[in-house]
Image (cartoon, rainbow, N blue to C red):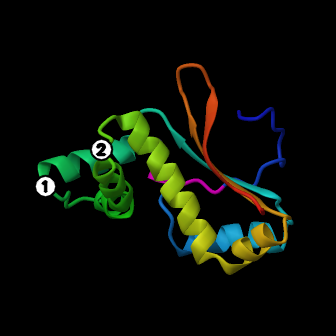
C-alpha cells in the first residue's frame, strides 16, 4: 500500500529491520540486472521494533540470546553511527539506518554501483511515518 503501486509494480525485498544478508543482496542484484529495476528504495519506518531492540541492546550493553540477536548485529553499525553523531532520537536512528543500509547496497553490489554510474539506476534511503503514511527521503544516490 505504497506509492500508489499496483500488483506487480514493485519488486519487494522485505526483512525485519531492513537487515541485509546474501539473499537480500542477491535479490536486489536480480532485480537490477534481470528485471531492469531503475530505482531501489530502502524504506525504514517509524517505531521499528528491530531498531528498537538494537538501540536497547546497545544502551543496556546486553546482547539478546534469542533470534532477535541477528537484527541487533545487523543494525548495530547504524546505532553506533547515530550515537557518534549525537543522535539519540529514534526517528533519527531510523533515518540513519536507512542511509547506512543504502550505502551498504551501493558499495557492496557491483551491478548497483555500475548502473548508478551510467545513470540508469537510483538508490534512495527513506523513512515511512506510520502516523500519516508520509515517506521522507533521507539520502539519494544518483549519477552526477
Ligand atoms: Zn521495523
Q: Quadrant of the C terminus?
A: bottom right
Say few, some or many: other residues with alpha carbon within 10 Å of mark 2 (under 14 / 14 to 19 / 20 or more): few
Q: Which residue is mark 2?
A: 86
Residue 41: x and y in percent read: 67, 51
- What element does badge 1 sit on? loop
Furthest-bottom residue in this view: 110
Precedes in sequence: disc 2 or disc 1: 1
Whether residue 48 is visible, yes or no, is no
Horizontal side of residue 89 vs 102, given as left or right = left
Nearer the observer: mark 2 or 1; the answer is 2
Q: Is residue 101 visible?
A: yes
The label shown at residue 61 is 1
Q: Is residue 3 left or right of residue 52?
A: right
Q: In this rendering, is residue 89 above or below 79?
A: above
How crowded pointer 1 is (Cα within 10 Å; few <14, some 14-19, many 20+) is rated as few
Determine the CA span between mark 2 and mark 1. 18 Å
Left or right, residue 22 beside residue 60:
right
Whether 120 is among the magenta residues is no
Label 1 within 8 A of ligand 1 by Cβ: no
In the rendered image of this protein, does residue 66 appear above or below residue 91?
A: below
Which residue shows up at 82% across the image and 61% down it?
A: 37
- Within the image, what quadrant is residue 86 found in? top left
Query: Where does the image place residue 34, in percent across and percent down from the top left?
Result: 84, 73
Give the residue drawn at x 58%, y 76%: 108
- Of all residues, the one furthest to the left in this rendering is 61
The correct choice, above or below, for 34 with respect to 120 in the image is below
What range is drawn magenta here?
13-18
Amino acid at each position: 500500500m505504497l506509492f500508489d503501486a499496483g500488483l506487480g509494480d514493485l519488486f519487494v525485498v522485505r526483512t525485519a529491520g531492513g537487515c541485509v544478508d546474501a539473499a537480500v543482496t542477491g535479490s536486489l542484484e536480480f532485480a537490477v540486472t534481470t528485471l531492469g529495476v531503475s530505482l531501489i528504495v530502502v524504506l525504514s519506518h517509524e517505531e521499528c521494533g528491530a531498531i528498537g531492540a538494537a538501540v536497547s541492546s546497545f544502551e543496556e550493553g546486553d546482547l539478546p540470546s534469542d533470534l532477535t540477536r541477528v537484527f541487533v548485529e545487523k543494525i548495530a553499525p547504524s546505532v553506533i553511527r547515530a550515537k557518534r553523531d549525537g543522535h539519540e532520537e529514534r526517528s533519527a536512528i531510523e533515518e540513519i539506518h536507512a542511509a547506512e543500509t543504502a550505502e551498504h547496497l551501493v558499495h557492496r553490489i557491483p551491478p548497483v554501483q555500475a548502473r548508478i554510474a551510467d545513470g540508469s539506476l537510483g538508490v534512495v534511503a527513506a523513512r515511512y511515518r506510520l502516523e500519516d503514511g508520509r515517506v521522507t527521503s533521507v539520502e539519494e544516490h544518483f549519477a552526477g
